[in-house]
Image (cartoon, helix red, strand yellow):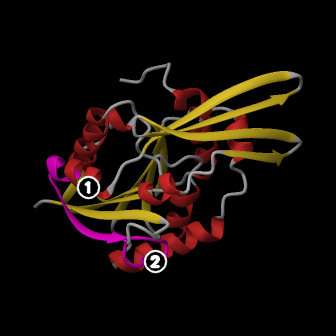
Amino acid sequence: MKNETEWFNDWFDSPYYHILYQNRDYSEAEFFLTNLIHFFNAPKSRKIIDLCCGKGRHAIFLNSLGYDVTGVDLSQSSIEEANKSSNKNLHFEVQDLRDLKYSENFDIALNLFTSLGYFNSREEDALVFKNIHKILKPGGFVLIDFMNSELTVNNLLQKEVKLIDGIQFNISKHLENDFIIKKIDFTDNETDYHFTEKVQALTLENFEEMLNAAGFKTYKVFGNYALEDYKINTSDRLIIVAQKNV
């Protein structure tokens, strides 16, 4: 189902993607993951899959806590980097969430840091949730960590300039047909580059509709990485925990 014209195919494999986002907060990610493990009260025998794992930083951390972790991502270059850390209980593969190649095998599925909503249709999003349902054991959990679209749209920073590693990234954002469109323009070595990120402004209601249709029941909704309650007008994140119906 992979379409070579989709924006994320080129952008996520580009070295410039990793330059632009190189300063992501690792301590924040570990704080979040540690809180999640306490929330799930998951024994080390639980198997976890990290969906859209990138270079594997979250999977690697969870594995360091003693868990058997599998990470999947569409980016070949990211998986190649992640595989440098693989071991008998830590595996990485290139896979498209619309065509997951696993059976009913995992206890917990994680999708972290706004890694959904990239596709062009809700039908494709719905297919992703059906596939997640198939790879989870009965009673298994899926956790979706997404932006709080309501807050993001209301506070959209329309223009921004970032100077990183000598490259000036000119960034603009706008809302179009319920998608947040982010255009990234820059010049490097006298060559002009133009990339686009396109993410659906999905709400809690959108997610619950797709989760319910796929055979999940909402278990808990959080609004930040400290796992405080979600508040539509003020929460930084929309974090949904849903359980596969037994």
Was residue 223 drawn as part of the magenta stretch in this picture? yes
At x 50%, y 66%, the residue is 236
Q: Quadrant of residue 189?
A: top right
Q: Residues within 10 Å of mark 2 (few under 14, many from 20)?
A: some
At x 45%, y 69%, the residue is 235
- Direction from residue 194 to residue 149 in the image, left or right: left
Q: CA distance from mark 2 to mark 1?
A: 25 Å
Say which label, 2 or 1, has the lower sequence index.
2
Along the line of sight, the residue nearer the viewer: 189 or 61: 189
- Magenta segment boundaries in residue numbering: 211-230
Quadrant of the drawing holding the C terminus: bottom left
Please name the residue that numbered disc 2 is placed on.
35
Vertical comparison of 131 with 222: above or below: above
- Direction from residue 201 to residue 180 in the image, left or right: right
Please name the residue that numbered disc 1 is placed on.
205
Q: Residues within 10 Å of mark 1 (few under 14, many from 20)?
A: few
Tag count: 2
| Residue 105 in sight here | no
Looking at the rendered structure, the kind of residue marked 2 is: Asn
Disc 1 on helix, strand or loop? Answer: helix
Disc 2 on helix, strand or loop? Answer: helix
Vertical comparison of 83 with 230: above or below: above
Q: Position of residue 149 (x, y in %)?
A: 43, 54
Q: Position of residue 25 (x, y in %)?
A: 66, 64
Q: Nearer the viewer, mark 2 or mark 1?
A: 1
At x 46%, y 47%, the residue is 115
Looking at the rendered structure, the kind of residue marked 1 is: Glu
At x 38%, y 30%, the residue is 120
Vertical comparison of 193 with 85: above or below: above
Was residue 22 drawn as part of the magenta stretch in this picture? no
